[in-house]
Image: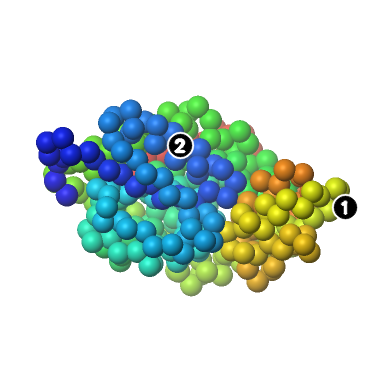
Amino acid sequence: MGKVRGNKAYNVLMVFFSATGNTKKIADRIQQKIESMDVTVTKYDITSYEDRNRTLALDEYDAVFFGFPIYSLRAPRVCREWLKRQEGNDKPCSVFFTYGGFGKEPAHYYIKKLLTERRFTLVSTAEFLGAHTFNYSGWQAAEGRPNQSDFEMAEDYAVQTLQRFKDGDIKAVCDFEKVKYTSEQLDQAEQFRFHVIKQLPTRDDKACTMCMLCETLCPTNAMNALKGEADAEACIACFRCIANCPDSVLHTNDIAAAWENKLNMHQTTKEAIDQMKSQIFL
């Protein structure tokens, strides 16, 4: 990909998955920053099942940003499966992650591996703190994130990545140290979410206006609004239904008692997580 020539507009696609809003907040800030630099940005939200199954013409764009949360040490399975259907044709791209303070390191390694297999040229990655999904069930991880410091880092990431996109001599992102977990082990780790969340999103006895939004927004068609419960076989515990319920009538089992165990397992504290910084990798 060469430098922009003449008056031809530079067109960037931003594809993101955002169940509870963290990744979208970062995507919005990146969009604002690069649009201020006279770059055209098209955002494409693949959180919904229907949108992930539409054909996307990547060849219409000069470069691509991908934005994903980290679930069980990697980008969500539904995002990885979507990526496996895309053909990069050596197009420059970058990936930014949001995470709740735990288990982020393997995500960069495996996303680079996947994108390389799909013939994308990954020029940078980044990670941004965001309130943990399980805070809806009683945890207190990265509350209030992303905050202003994260947004400022997102703007810096946008500037540096755009420069790399436009560079006539594009170099791939730095190598990430190979992690100790195999893909098969991480597949098993994905099930750990359901060892903690034993009761998937369920409607309680409060008044529900039956707006059907929980069912409409569900990324995997797992939520049944009439029954008021999620299908255990399809649910990925992303909590998009809970985060967007206008009546606040959806909940899981309360896992507040597991919060201290989680901190001890990772040998950290709430204060240490609160002080964590977002990072850029070039």
Residue named by callout 1: 205
- In the picture as drawn, the residue positioned furthest to the right comes out as 205
Inspect the image, locate mark 1, and give the three-letter code of the amino acid beneath it: Asp
Image height of 220 relative to 243, above or below? below
Identify which residue, 254 or 227, lies in the foreground.
227
Which sits earlier in the primary sequence, circle 2 or circle 1? 2
Instruction: Name the residue rendered at 27%, 43% in the picture.
Output: 11
In this rendering, position of residue 189 left or right of residue 172: right
Q: CA distance from mark 2 to mark 1?
A: 36 Å
Residue named by callout 2: 28
Identify which residue, 104 or 95, lies in the foreground.
95
Instruction: Name the residue rendered at 86%, 48% in the picture.
Output: 206
Which quarter of the figure has residue 22? top right
Q: How is the model colour-coded? A: rainbow
Question: How many marks do you count on the picture?
Answer: 2
Inspect the image, locate mark 2, and give the three-letter code of the amino acid beneath it: Asp
Q: Are marks 2 and 1 in contact (CB under 8 Å)?
A: no
